[in-house]
Image (spheres, rainbow, N blue to C red):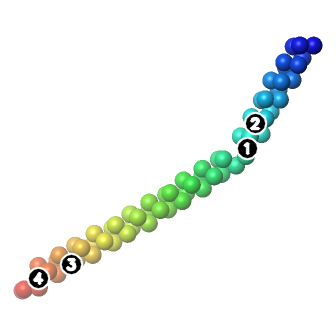
């Protein structure tokens, strides 16, 4: 009887851990990763735009006195 109770307790704890694992944490992390990638891409494009505009200003300043 004691071994049967122990088996039931172990089964209950195992089942509850499987249930909690399917609670949506994976979806949340996937969404956070997707948003982080989109944010980094937008930052990269903004930085690239700023660098190109600085380069254009420097080029036009060199030839302003020609």
Question: For mark 4, what is the residue?
Answer: 63
Tell me whether the residue at label 2 lies in contact with that at label 1, contact meaning CB atoms closer than 8 angstroms: yes
Q: Earlier in the sequence, mark 4 or mark 2?
A: 2
Q: Residue lying farthest right?
A: 1
Tell me whether the residue at label 4 lies in contact with that at label 2, contact meaning CB atoms closer than 8 angstroms: no
SS under mark 3: helix
Q: Position of residue 8 (x, y in %)?
A: 87, 23
Quarter-wise, where is residue 7 in the image? Answer: top right
Q: For residue 57, which numbered disc appears in the image? A: 3
Q: CA distance from mark 1 to mark 4?
A: 64 Å
Q: Residue lying farthest top?
A: 2
* Number of other residues with Cα within 10 Å of mark 4, as a class: few under 14, some 14 to 19, many 20 or more: few
Q: Is residue 60 left or right of residue 48?
A: left
Q: Position of residue 34 (x, y in %)?
A: 55, 57
* Number of other residues with Cα within 10 Å of mark 2, as a class: few under 14, some 14 to 19, many 20 or more: few
Q: Is residue 30 above or below residue 21?
A: below
SS under mark 2: helix
Question: For mark 2, what is the residue?
Answer: 18
SS under mark 4: loop
Q: Nearer the viewer, mark 4 or mark 2?
A: 2
SS under mark 1: loop
| Quarter of the figure that contains the C terminus | bottom left
Q: For residue 22, which numbered disc appears in the image? A: 1
Q: Is residue 16 above or below residue 36?
A: above
Q: CA distance from mark 2 to mark 1?
A: 7 Å
């Amino acid at each position: 009887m004691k071994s049967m109770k122990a088996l039931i307790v172990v089964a209950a704890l195992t089942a509850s851990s499987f249930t909690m694992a399917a609670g949506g944490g994976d979806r949340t992390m996937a969404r956070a990763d997707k948003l982080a990638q989109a944010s980094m891409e937008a930052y990269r494009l903004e930085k690239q735009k700023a660098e190109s505009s600085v380069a254009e200003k420097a080029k036009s300043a060199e030839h302003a006195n020609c």
